[in-house]
Image: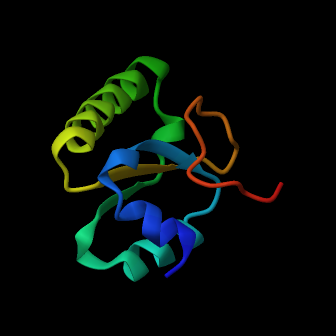
Amino acid sequence: MGHLAERYRDAGRSGVYRVSDAAIPRAAAVEAGPASQVLLLEGLDRLLPAELTSIVAALEHVAAARKERGPPFFAVLLDPSRRLSLPTLYKEKP
């Protein structure tokens, strides 16, 4: 199993992350299987800042609860322009 798929199975690493391409996170979610919940979201980088802040806050709340009592939850926001101020899911090549 790949490193990202293993990470998806770890509830302690639940959170809200960004990526510039959804291919690797999508493949890793399939590899991780139903043991983890991975939500891939596209288009949120086009929202107004206040709207985005509300959505991210709600997703972070869910992730924090899952860190404490599982199962894993990962919200992965597709951000090809790398504008969102969120941690990256994995180290991407520039």
The quadrant where residue 29 appears: bottom left
Q: Residue furthest left?
A: 69
Count how many numbered circles sit on residues in the image. 0
Residue 79 in view here = yes
**Does 48 sit left or right of 82 as displayed?**
left
Q: Residue at x 36, y 52 (%)?
A: 74
The quadrant where residue 94 appears: bottom right
Foreground: 17 or 52?
17
Position of residue 46 measured from the top left corner of the image (x, y, whole percent): 52, 37
Position of residue 50 measured from the top left corner of the image (x, y, whole percent): 41, 17
Q: Residue at x 28, y 65 (%)?
A: 36
Judge whether 45 appears above or below 10 on screen.
above
Foreground: 55 or 94?
94
- Give the colour scheme of this rendering: rainbow
Q: Residue at x 46, y 41 (%)?
A: 44
Residue 14 in view here = no
Q: Residue at x 42, y 81 (%)?
A: 31
Position of residue 51 measured from the top left corner of the image (x, y, whole percent): 37, 24
Position of residue 10 measured from the top left corner of the image (x, y, whole percent): 35, 57
Q: Residue furthest top?
A: 50
**Does 51 sit left or right of 65 as displayed?**
right
